Image: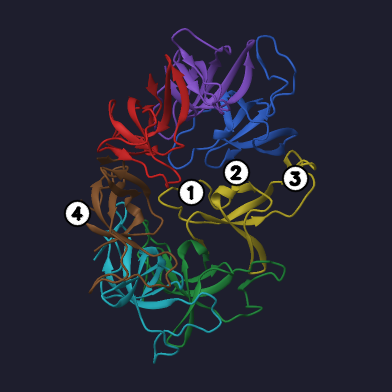
Chain colours: A blue, B yellow, C green, D cyan, E purple, F brown, G red
Amino acid sequence: MKPINDRVVVKPAPAEEKTAGGIIVPDTAKEKPQRGEVIAVGPGKEGNAMTVSTGDIVLYGKYAGQELKHEGQDLLIMREDDILIIL
Amino acid sequence: MKPINDRVVVKPAPAEEKTAGGIIVPDTAKEKPQRGEVIAVGPGKEGNAMTVSTGDIVLYGKYAGQELKHEGQDLLIMREDDILIIL
Amino acid sequence: MKPINDRVVVKPAPAEEKTAGGIIVPDTAKEKPQRGEVIAVGPGKEGNAMTVSTGDIVLYGKYAGQELKHEGQDLLIMREDDILIIL
Amino acid sequence: MKPINDRVVVKPAPAEEKTAGGIIVPDTAKEKPQRGEVIAVGPGKEGNAMTVSTGDIVLYGKYAGQELKHEGQDLLIMREDDILIIL
Amino acid sequence: MKPINDRVVVKPAPAEEKTAGGIIVPDTAKEKPQRGEVIAVGPGKEGNAMTVSTGDIVLYGKYAGQELKHEGQDLLIMREDDILIIL
Amino acid sequence: MKPINDRVVVKPAPAEEKTAGGIIVPDTAKEKPQRGEVIAVGPGKEGNAMTVSTGDIVLYGKYAGQELKHEGQDLLIMREDDILIIL
Amino acid sequence: MKPINDRVVVKPAPAEEKTAGGIIVPDTAKEKPQRGEVIAVGPGKEGNAMTVSTGDIVLYGKYAGQELKHEGQDLLIMREDDILIIL
């Protein structure tokens, strides 16, 4: 599974309200960042290297990416710049 | 058959609801990715090399590309960046 | 006849519904690609070389280009990127 | 008379309906290309050289350029990219 | 915690109306700059180095960034260019 | 008086309807080019050199630039690209 | 006080209607340029050096910049390109 250009495949974490010592998205945020694991990374676009790697746990905007199902998994394909932060 | 710049010719896979161990697009997705085989690849645009190759099985956005019929085949011409992922 | 920048002069093929073993644009396509022969090619824009050459048979979008008549011929001037594919 | 950047001064040809063996703009074209002679050429913009030269007979879009009168002549100042073709 | 591209994580200072010899945002400003401390800095975007460093006290536009909670802290993720000034 | 980037200071010529052997803007032109003298030139923007020099007589679009009064003179500050031609 | 990228901190001059031999903005100008002193200059953006220096007296558009108060002073943060001219 090889994303094109600067695209990244992310496996979203199951929704959770609280994690011990982890990230808690405030209830009032209109566009809550989501958490997931990077499972595939494209080669980069126009000669710019990628920052994320497979296995990274990342936060991304709520509406980032396009859904697909692969071998029973719900995955997202998004551009690297839709990712906000690597935890 | 030689696409211009960063264009790619894709032969769409026949529509299917389920594949054993393969990609299943969820029913609720508004813009379902489609699956096809790359059959021709352009030289790239403004000096940027292409990532996809002839024979690659790819996913692309539902409304990507322009239809044409060639020797009885229904094909699509799209830009490489309209392709999301190489399976 | 020397097109400016990335422009190309195309001589459209006469409209035809069917060709033996050739390209048939499906009736349902809203924006049917058209077929023509390249008869003049510009030097390229901002240092990017051109891909098409004089004599190439090409497909291009239905509304691509601007019409002109030259020595009795109906021709089109378009940008190279309006061309989809070289057959 | 020295145009700035990628600008070109064109002396429009008098309107004519027909020329022997020359360019005839079809009556049905909504935006007919016009014909004129280049009489001054700018140095180019951001390091990109100019293609047209003084004396070139060119076609350009009907609404291209800005009018001015110089020593009794009606002239047009336009960007080189508003020119479609050198005849 | 590693921001992507040109993103920066900022810990907002608690709202205050006045500081001795410090920054006071005028009441009449429609979009008051906010003050915070940079706690994580991305690698930069497309080869451009970053200017801010961890520990910098910065001003940023009122609506800059996206909120997240990390280990009980309210944080903001924003692009470096959303930061106005390092104090 | 040193303009920023690609800006130029122009002293507009007094409005005149006719000049002997000079530029006459046709009455029907909706946006008449104006004439003036360049009195200050910026260093250029992003490494691109300037074409106009102090003392040049130029034409520029009617609505180009921003007015200011300096030592009793009515002047205009505009970008070099708002200038059409050096006479 | 270190502005980010191409930003500049300006201390606006007190409003005045007339200055002897100085700049007088005409009453009829819709967007009057304002006058101020540059008190801090950013490092530049994407490798382009800055033109203004600390201590420069500059004119800038009326609505340029964002207000802040620093040690009792009313200041403006703006991009260098919002500055029109160095006097």
Q: Nearer the viewer, mark 3 or mark 4?
A: 4
Does residue A75 lie above or below F30 as drawn? Answer: above
Task: Name the residue carrying label 3.
Answer: B30
Query: What distance separates the C-alpha of mark 2 from that of mark 4?
Result: 61 Å
Task: Name the residue carrying label 1.
Answer: B50
Q: Position of residue C15 (x, y in %)?
A: 61, 80
Q: Nearer the viewer, mark 2 or mark 4?
A: 4
Q: Chain of mark 2?
A: B
Q: Nearer the viewer, mark 1 or mark 3?
A: 3
Amino acid on which disc 2 is placed: Ile
Task: Name the residue carrying label 2.
Answer: B86
Seen at 42% across and 14% down, the residue is G71
Most extreme residue toward the top is E20
Q: Quadrant of the N terminus of chain C?
A: bottom left
Q: Nearer the viewer, residue C67 or F52?
A: F52
Mark 2 or mark 3, which is nearer the start of the sequence? 3
Q: Which element is circle 3 on?
A: loop
**Dot 4: few (<14), some (14–19), or many (≥20) neighbours within 10 Å?**
few
Left or right: G78 with respect to A68?
left
> In the rendered image, is residue E34 in sight?
yes
Query: What distance separates the C-alpha of mark 1 from that of mark 3?
Result: 29 Å
Q: Position of residue D70 (x, y in %)?
A: 28, 72
Query: What distance separates the C-alpha of mark 1 from that of mark 2?
Result: 13 Å
